[in-house]
Image: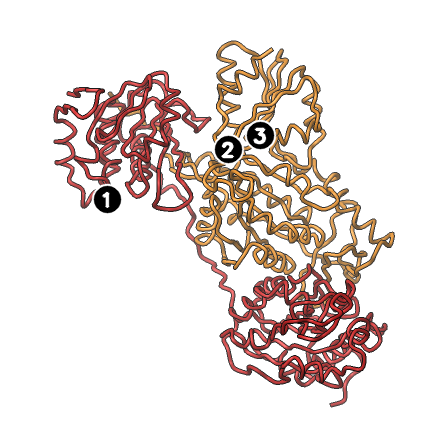
């Protein structure tokens, strides 16, 4: 038998792709506290990032990141639910101060400490309400090895462009499963930079233009006073109770996400002509859905597939796609159908059904069954 | 020294109650920074929640106003990022914040992060109605503690003085001019801390009528003194400029061997932690890739390293692999009782395929073809997984044995491994007389 020479392949896991991509994008510092199953991101960052800090706890990790971000550095951390829960108040602070940073959330089975080495997709309901007041916290979800590479960069760009913390949502298997992967699949990664205010007028920290994103200067700037405030504040960054200027500033925090979402909208839509059914899936379950769609089409079934990657805020574009179909199936590895509820509400919709489960990856067969059910 | 007019504070009135010690701290900070000749643009003031935290609007320095109790951690990030001792990072925090953020204080002192922490200790929570903090001394009354505290409050100076990294720790009474002491603290490299004792005019004075601050301090057994004044190496942030990529073309695996795999094969290895299951799985994965296949390997194990089961699911395919799970594997190798427990559910669901199982175990009911082999007895527990993958390849011949050997021999495990013994064992006819499921493999 002759040897068919294939393109050379590497064996790698998602953690390597994410960290290498972020490092090439110009991320400055990883600040971490160990937690399974996020530890590969920690160890790879130790090797690859310009600076690395082992924080004494997750609250410190996020606070240190905020400190770094006020000076113009781009910080990254990786955690799982128990750690993220501790970070949450500080994520709100970063959101209010408008500090770019990336939090890689590696989902594992809960509640509480749950099963640390078992993957899950159980944290989206938390993320959709993570910011007090229901403000949009951007959540970007990887659904393949290639996404680990490209979306990590895109998530970092979103954080910088919108001056916001961004959650890169993953799960245990997306970080830890090894796979053969050809380097040629990796696109060039450009260095991202944080633009600094260079106007002649006195810098006003939270004054914005039509983008609704304020200009940036680091604390320690030689010419201009820079203020950051986690409390309700006016454009100067001075604490206010409910003055109009301050409340307008608070409202802007949501509006900037809605206004700029189209520039950071990532999804895969594989629409099939004549299909009445749309399968929606994200994250780790997306690969099972891809396989289910492949199998169904081989059997002559017509089915379309939508893989949202910018999960939050929910893009109106998803509904433009959804309304073309009579039957919607949403597959995700949690019990209650978290994204299904985000899209269709607590009581759902007759045309919508879910494929759900915990403690094991949802199989292509289970998805196929629901897609074919009447 | 003749001081300039205000350089660090605005001309507006300070935002505190009349008689509050916070006023003195702000004024003395202005004076201390002037004494040291600082430029306001070289000063970052980090504050948090509590009455003290409303000061930042009065300062002309950079200001960062964060969460209750977290200002020291926030300042740690600012300080480590600036990485420049010319930039002075000052933290204002209350006794409540210092209670919440005690770990941050210890950690910042321990590491010698460049900053001066000024604790505004008025021994209660002034902003929320005068509740006690952990700094409230025994006998000191507050509106919600009308009989006075029963326990002595924290002695923060003693606590931080005990941390080796602190360069300067002092407690002072927050009256009159203490700018020189503040200036001394500000001028220290690394981590310095000043605890300023105050009485809250709204709640402290009213709850403890006629009691003087000096008397409260004396009754509490707190000493007004300098606890630490030493040269300590301050923290320096390492910023690497040269890196090796986490992967590169030079790490790529070349196709060296042919494979006759026509459809994907899913293999599951189930054994015990510490018996090389994950390593064996990586060998077979890499061997498959060396044979021109695509491959994935998903590991499963409990959270505690080195205890309980260890399992791996390997998929090899000439096509792109989408789903990386193996609910119905083609082959399961079970090398230990831990592994068998883990595999039971999968074995019960299998509709065919093969189970290679250690002959010390009893195979459960399964539709898989059951084949016994004494992996543990012949290879020893530590090598049982390695034996199982060579056995797998010997029996299935999905790709050339040379591919697995080439991968295995690159590894340091191979150096202490008796391959001749293994191949002799694998090729011997084996008669299993230990269980009901007798099987002869030739």
Q: Using residue B301 as the reference point, say whether residue B369 is left or right of it.
A: left
- Residue B258, percent from left and from top: 27, 25
Q: Badge 2 is on which residue?
A: A144
Q: Colour of chain A?
A: orange
- Residue B98, percent from left and from top: 64, 67
Where disc 2 sits, the SS reads loop
Q: Are marks 1 and 2 on the same chain?
A: no
- Residue A357, percent from left and from top: 54, 28
Where disc 3 sits, the SS reads loop
Above or below, B36 against B256 in this view is: below
Mark 3 / mark 2, whichever is N-terminal: 2
In contact (CB < 8 Å): disc 1 and disc 3 = no
Question: Can you say which quadrant of the picture contains the C terminus of chain A?
Answer: top right
Question: Can you say which quadrant of the picture contains the N terminus of chain A?
Answer: top left
* Marked residue chain, label 2: A
For residue A270, say whether it is visible.
no
Q: Badge 1 is on which residue?
A: B413
Mark in front: 1 vs 2 = 1
Where disc 1 sits, the SS reads helix
Label placed on residue B281:
none
* Marked residue chain, label 3: A
In contact (CB < 8 Å): disc 3 and disc 2 = no
- Label 1 CA crowd tier, 10 Å (few <14, some 14–19, many 20+): few
Q: Badge 3 is on which residue?
A: A335
Above or below, A142 against A55 in this view is: above
């Amino acid at each position: 038998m002759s040897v068919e020479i294939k393109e050379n392949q590497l064996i790698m896991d998602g953690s390597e792709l994410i960290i290498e991509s972020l490092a090439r994008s110009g991320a400055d510092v990883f600040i971490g506290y160990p937690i399974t199953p996020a530890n590969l991101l920690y160890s790879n960052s130790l090797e690859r990032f310009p600076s690395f800090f082992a924080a004494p706890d997750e609250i410190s990790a996020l606070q240190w990141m905020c400190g770094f971000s006020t000076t113009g550095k781009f910080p990254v951390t990786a955690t799982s639910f128990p750690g993220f829960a501790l970070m949450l108040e500080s994520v709100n602070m970063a959101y209010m101060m408008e500090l770019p940073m990336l939090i890689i959330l590696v989902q594992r089975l809960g509640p509480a400490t749950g099963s640390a080495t078992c993957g899950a997709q159980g944290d989206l309901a938390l993320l959709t309400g993570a910011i007090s007041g229901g403000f949009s916290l951007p959540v970007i979800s990887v659904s393949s090895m290639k996404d680990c590479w490209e979306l990590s960069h895109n998530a970092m760009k979103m954080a910088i462009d919108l001056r916001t913390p961004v959650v890169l949502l993953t799960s245990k298997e997306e970080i830890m499963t090894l796979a053969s992967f050809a380097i040629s699949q990796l696109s060039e990664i450009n260095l991202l930079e944080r633009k600094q205010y260079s106007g002649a007028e006195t810098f006003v920290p939270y004054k914005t233009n039509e983008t609704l994103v304020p200009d940036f200067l680091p604390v320690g700037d030689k010419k201009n006073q820079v203020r950051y405030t986690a409390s309700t504040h006016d454009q100067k960054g001075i604490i206010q109770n409910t003055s109009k200027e301050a409340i307008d500033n608070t409202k802007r925090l949501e509006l900037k996400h809605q206004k700029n979402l189209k520039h950071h909208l990532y999804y895969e839509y594989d629409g099939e002509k004549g299909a009445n059914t749309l399968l929606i899936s994200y994250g780790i379950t997306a690969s099972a859905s891809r396989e289910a769609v492949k199998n169904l089409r081989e059997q002559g079934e017509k089915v379309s597939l939508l893989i949202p990657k910018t999960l939050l805020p929910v893009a109106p574009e998803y509904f433009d796609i959804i309304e073309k179909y009579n039957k919607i199936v949403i597959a995700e590895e949690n019990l209650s159908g978290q994204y299904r509820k985000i899209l269709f509400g607590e009581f759902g919709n007759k045309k919508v059904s879910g494929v759900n489960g915990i403690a094991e990856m949802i199989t292509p067969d289970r998805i196929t069954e629901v897609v074919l059910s009447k | 020294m003749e001081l300039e007019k205000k350089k660090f504070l605005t001309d507006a009135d300070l935002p505190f109650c009349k008689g509050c010690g916070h006023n003195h701290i702000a004024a003395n900070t202005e004076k201390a920074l002037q004494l040291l000749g600082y430029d306001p643009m070289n000063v970052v003031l980090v504050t948090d929640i509590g009455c003290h935290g409303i000061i930042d609007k009065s300062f002309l320095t950079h200001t960062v106003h964060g969460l209750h109790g977290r200002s020291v951690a926030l300042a740690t990030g600012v300080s480590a990022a600036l990485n420049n001792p010319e930039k002075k990072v000052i933290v204002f925090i209350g006794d409540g914040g210092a209670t919440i953020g005690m770990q941050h204080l210890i950690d910042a002192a321990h590491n010698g992060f460049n900053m001066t922490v000024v604790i505004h200790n008025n021994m209660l929570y002034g902003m929320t109605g005068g509740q006690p903090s952990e700094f409230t001394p025994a006998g000191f009354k507050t509106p919600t503690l009308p009989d006075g505290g029963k326990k002595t409050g924290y002695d923060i100076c003693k606590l931080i003085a005990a941390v080796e990294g602190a360069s300067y720790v002092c407690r002072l009474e927050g009256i009159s001019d203490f700018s020189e002491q503040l200036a001394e603290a500000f001028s220290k490299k690394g981590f310095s801390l000043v605890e300023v004792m105050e009485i809250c005019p709204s709640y402290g004075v009213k709850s403890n009528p006629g009691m003087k601050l000096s008397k409260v301090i004396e009754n509490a057994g707190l000493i007004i003194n300098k606890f630490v004044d030493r040269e300590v190496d301050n923290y320096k942030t390492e910023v690497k400029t040269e890196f090796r990529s986490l992967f590169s073309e030079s790490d790529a695996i070349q196709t060296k061997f042919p494979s006759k795999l026509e459809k994907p094969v899913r293999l599951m290895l189930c054994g015990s932690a510490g018996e090389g299951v994950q390593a064996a799985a990586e060998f077979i994965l890499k061997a498959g890739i060396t044979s021109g296949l695509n491959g994935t390997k998903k590991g499963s194990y409990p959270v505690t390293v080195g205890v309980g089961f260890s399992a791996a699911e390997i998929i090899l395919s000439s096509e792109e692999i989408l789903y990386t799970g193996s609910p119905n594997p083609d082959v399961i190798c079970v090398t230990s009782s831990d592994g068998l427990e883990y595999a039971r559910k999968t074995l019960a669901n299998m509709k065919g395929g093969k189970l290679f199982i250690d002959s010390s175990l009893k195979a459960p009911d399964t539709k898989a073809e059951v084949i016994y082999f004494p992996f543990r007895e012949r290879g020893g527990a530590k090598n049982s997984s390695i034996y199982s993958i060579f056995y797998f390849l010997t029996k299935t011949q999905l790709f050339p044995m040379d591919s697995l050997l080439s991968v295995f021999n690159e590894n340091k495990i191979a150096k202490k491994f008796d391959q001749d013994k293994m191949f002799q064992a694998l090729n011997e006819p084996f008669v299993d007389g230990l269980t009901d499921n007798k099987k002869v493999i030739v």
